[in-house]
Amino acid sequence: MFSILISVFNYDCTELVGELINSCSLAKTDYEIIVGNDCSTDPDVLQALKKIDALPHCRVFNEAHNVGKAYMLYHLADIAIYPYLIIIDSDARLLRDDFIERYLHAATGHDVVSGHVVVLESALRADNRLRYRYEFAAAGERALDYRRRHPYKNLCTINLLIRRSVFLATPFPKDCYQYGYEDTILGIDLEDMGVEIYHIDNPLIHNDIDSNHSFIGKTHKALHVLAGLDRFYKERIRISRTALKLQRWHLLWAVKVWHRLFGALERRMLMRWPSVTLFNIYKLGYYSLINPK
């Protein structure tokens, strides 16, 4: 029995909901689909949400203020009625009709089950090459054997099954209630609680790849979230851990100077000639300037 949670902001998830209804029917399981509207303003999206709310087994929760994915998911989990949650991003699509059935089998004996996400070549556009290359570079870490060797490193709330009681026992830090690092933080908390994460081959398609401009903007928001986290998390997240090491070695000042001099140029280069390596350098420089001591 599943409560499927989808957080939405200005994105029409009608086709995803239809695919999920079909998959649940094929699995012959009890379910509900709760769509959390995070204060969307697009008239077409609002109209689509009204139609979803009228579908069997579906309901829409409307938030009065934009609160971010982490807060929305926690609230949706609180009002869910079934013991297992399936968390899915609004811009995902099903790759297989037996998506729910695979989770149904895997849920037996496991509190947390992680599928994964794939990006299709057809998603590549002229304006989204940075995000596409970033996702392509991460493909190796999303392979099933790698995820099973590093179960807490690659948790993905784009596609996750988790027991409701476990999710409610791991509230996100107050500084995480905007875009960024909710996946990483949940993985850290589950590891500290000793909760096993079982990884399976049950992919979703990441359907809407951000443009270069949008991706860099979201990265800035995520890095501000990271800068506000406790040192407990910063010691265990790659970019902040690197910054802490450079600070201990008295080298972080050089990163700050570099970013002040060349950060704007790096950003322009990323827009025109996307590079994952340059993107990582840009992120470290940006983070070093906004991170409090």
Image (cartoon, rainbow, N blue to C red):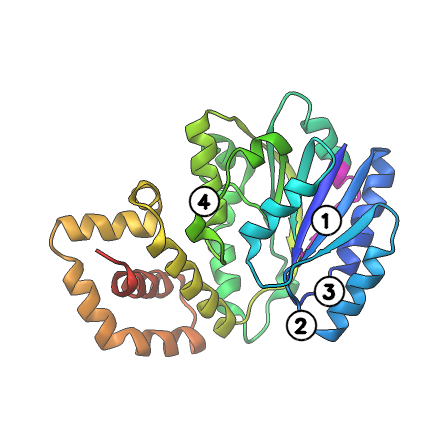
Kindly check if marks 4 and 2 are in contact, taking CB atoms under 8 A apart as contact. Answer: no
* CA–CA distance in space, label 3 to label 1: 18 Å
**Horizontal side, residue 234 vs residue 171: left or right:** left
Closer to the chain start, of discs 3 and 2, is 3
Assign a secondary structure to mark 2. Answer: loop
Closer to the chain start, of discs 3 and 1, is 3
* CA–CA distance in space, label 4 to label 2: 29 Å
Q: Quadrant of residue 251?
A: bottom left
Q: Which residue is mark 1?
A: 95
* Residue 28 x/y as whole percent: 86, 33
Viewer-proximal residue among 100 and 95: 100
* 3 or 2: mark nearer the eye: 2
Q: Is residue 55 found inside the magenta-colored segment of the image?
A: no
Residue at position x 74%, y 74% from top?
43
* Residue 10 x/y as whole percent: 66, 68
Closer to the chain start, of discs 1 and 4, is 1
Magenta segment boundaries in residue numbering: 90-100
Q: Which residue is mark 3?
A: 12
Picture quarter with the C terminus = bottom left
Q: Which residue is mark 2?
A: 41
Residue at position x 18%, y 70% from top?
257
Q: Quadrant of residue 87?
A: top right
Q: Which residue is mark 4?
A: 184
Assign a secondary structure to mark 3. Answer: loop
> What label sits on residue 189 in the rendered view?
none
Looking at the rendered structure, the kind of residue marked 1 is Leu
* 2 or 1: mark nearer the eye: 2
